[in-house]
Every structure is written in C-alpha cells, then in structure tokens.
Image (cartoon, grey):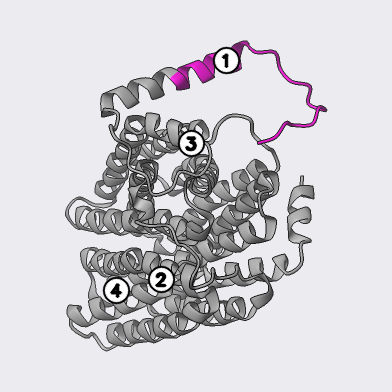
Amino acid sequence: MLGPYKDVLSRPGALRFSAAGTLARLPMSMVGIGIVLMVQSLYGSYGLAGRVSAVYIVAQAVCSPQLARLVDRHGQARIMRPAVGVAAVGLVGLVTAAVLSAPEAVLYVAAAVTGAAIGSFGSLVRARWSFLLGDDERRIHTAYSLESALDELVFVIGPVAATLLATGVTPSAGLVVPLVAMVIGGYWFCSLRATEPPVAPADAPRPRGSVLRNPAMLVLMLVFVAMGSIFGANDVSTVAFADEAGQKSLAGPVLAVFAAGSLLSGLLYGTRHWKRPLHQRFANGTVALAAGVTLFFFVHSLPVLSAVMFVTGFAIAPTLINGNGMVQQLVAPERLTEGLTWVGTSLGVGVSVGSSIAGAQIDAHGSHGGFRVAMVSAAVAVIAVLAGYRTLRGRHDGHVHDAIEPESPSATGGAAVAAAELAECVEHDRTRPQPDPDRPAGPA
C-alpha cells in the first residue's frame, strides 16, 4: 500500500520539504481552537471567542492569496521569511493581550496581524510537488493525497495538543506550540532552496487577469467556503458539547477522531488511481460529507459523537484531494500557488463564518445550536456543487485560464445534470462486471 508514497518521497529533497511543510502548517489546526479555548476561558464568552477566531481566519483568507501571488512572482523564500516573522509577532501579541485582559479591539488587531502574515504552507508544498513531478499525473495524485493525509495528521495531533495544553496547563498554552512550529518549520522550509519552484523572468509574459475569472474556480471556492463552515461550526460546537457533558478536556480527542477518519481515507485514496473524472468524485464526496454531518445534531453522548465523526471523516480527505486536483487542471502552472491558496483560504473563510455564527448560536441555544449551523452549511455545500456541476464538468479537462464563460448555466439546470449523472454512476457501478482485483489499475 505504501509503495506509491515511497516512490514520490524518494525524489531528491522531497522528504525534507514535505516534513518541513507539515511542521509549518501545524498552526492551521491549533490556532483556531487555541484562540477559542483561550478567549472563552479568560473572557467567559464563546461568542467573543468565535469572533476573534473569525477575524484571524478572515485576515488569513484575504491576505494569503496576495502573499501567494507575490510568491509566484518573487519566490517562496523571499516572501515567506519576513511573513513568518510578522505572524509570530502577531501571535505573541494576541496571547499577551488575552492574558492581560486587554479590550476586545486589541484582540482583533493582534488576530488580524497573525492571520494576514501566516500564509498557506500547504499551497507552497503542493506547488513544490508540481514542480518536482512535472506532468506525471499519477505521481502528482499520490503526492497530493500524501499532503492531504498529512493535513489530517496535523488535525489529529493539533486539537488534542491545544486542548490538553489549554485545559491542563494554562489557557494560553495551546497557542505556544503552533507558534514554535510555525517559526521552526517555516524557516526550515524556506531554507530548502533546491526544490523551490523557479520564478519566471521579469520580462516573461504573465497571464492577465485573475484566476477568479474562471467560473469553475468560483464554484470550487463556494463549495470550499461551505465545507469550511461545516468544520468551523463543528469545532466550536464540539468544544461546547464536551463542556456541557462535564468533559471539556475530551473536545480535542473527539475532533482528532474526526480527523483520523479523514487521515485513513486519504492514505487509502492515494494508493489507487481512479478512472472516474475529478468533478464526479468531488461531487460525490461533498454529498457524502454533508450526509454524515447532518447526524451530528441528533447525537447526545461523546462516544456516539466520536463514532459518527470517525465515519463521516472518511469523506473529507478525498473531497479535498479532488478539489485541489481540479485547481491544478484549471489554472496556469505559473499561477498554481495562487489558485491553490484561493481554495485553501475559501475553506478558511468558511471556518471563520461557521465558528462565528455557531459561537453565537451556542451562547443562545447550547451546543446543538452550533451543530444546526453545521447542518445548514452542509446543505449549502450540496446545493452549490449540484448547481455548479455543469460548470465543473465542462472545465475539468485541460488548463482553462482567465476565461469568462459567455453564458453560465442556470442553477436548476446544473442541479438536474448533476443528479442525473450521479444516478447514472450509481447504476453503472451496480451493473458493470467487477474488475479482477489483481489487475493493475488504469491511469487516473
């Protein structure tokens, strides 16, 4: 099973930049929940905690694509070295302000500075894989699957560590580990120049416009926003659910179980090369994730919640892998970091929206008010992927850059096409002969 992963990691420098990138993106699973735990403990409000976390993530969502554009133009190390330093200063300021019971406005400013400079190391790592592996789609699929699995590993470790530190040491301790990881991992990653994608010459022609002019990118981003809202609402709601059960320290482990399901599915998914088009796999994964999330609202014990989350987590990594794979097909190679960052930050925008709304709902109605927000977000994700299905289907083959579709399909038309094609896939799977398990899989 691990053969494809050993193959890509054996490439010169691959293991080092993948390891450094994993360490550098540990904050993505710890800072959000760390802020919630710290602010709620010190200020006594889930609403305020959700708002501060939302400011951090919105700042990251707004500024990360701009950092990515600068990276594409000037190089990863040149841009990210000073950015990591600024983010570290902002995070230290946020912790200090909270410990000193500073006014809310100070928390917002510090959170905004941190989010604005922290960037997206996941996008940087994937850009290195694309440079290292070229047009080898099989190996790129494996490498992207590996990175998605490592993302989930980060989400297995991060929430547990943040929760244990914040509840067992001091409320601010959950932000110390991501601060150290960001500095060490970020500067280590930037020092690995041999695998850094080259910068196009200054006089080389550059694509005009924005990657956002591609309608398929807009559909992807909308679905990622909705998925992010699921994750954001779920994080805050799980903390509140565990608190209501008198076992707040178990919130991190429960969230880790959610990520563990995704980690396992991501590793398994990357060992096989799939014939079905990316847009179909992406739509199927979105629907499966939404179906699982709706069950959270009806759970009334931590063990049952953990079990449901573990199974639902199996839909996360494959869906994110397919979404990132579609970005690679939709944007020009010299804009890949920017494209990947846009979908990554769309996920972040969703997390901020979900956590903020869920925080307010939890203050008013308890943890199940927050899970209700996750259910609504799941419905939005399904509606978005079905309404935009025709656009995704028409744009997934080859690079389509900076184009505006002259006439966008209607939402109802896209949903009808999606429903018919997904039903056709199910029927085809039921009626076709089963393949020989010993026969090698065809190309992805």
Residue at horizontal 52 percent and vertical 82 percent from the top: 183
Residue beneath disc 3? 285
Disc 2 is placed on an element classified as: helix
The type of residue carrying mark 4 is Val
Q: CA distance from mark 2 to mark 3?
A: 30 Å
Residue beneath disc 2? 67
Q: Position of residue 70 (x, y in %)?
A: 43, 72
Residue beneath disc 4? 39
The type of residue carrying mark 3 is Gly
| Left or right of residue 280, residue 441 in this image | right
Q: Name the quadrant containing residue 6.
A: bottom right
Task: Check if mark 1's residue and mark 3's residue have beta carbons within 8 Å.
Answer: no
The type of residue carrying mark 2 is Leu
| Crowd class of label 4 (few under 14; some 14 to 19; many from 20; radius 10 Å) | many
Q: Position of residue 110 (x, y in %)?
A: 29, 81
Residue beneath disc 1? 428
Report the label total: 4
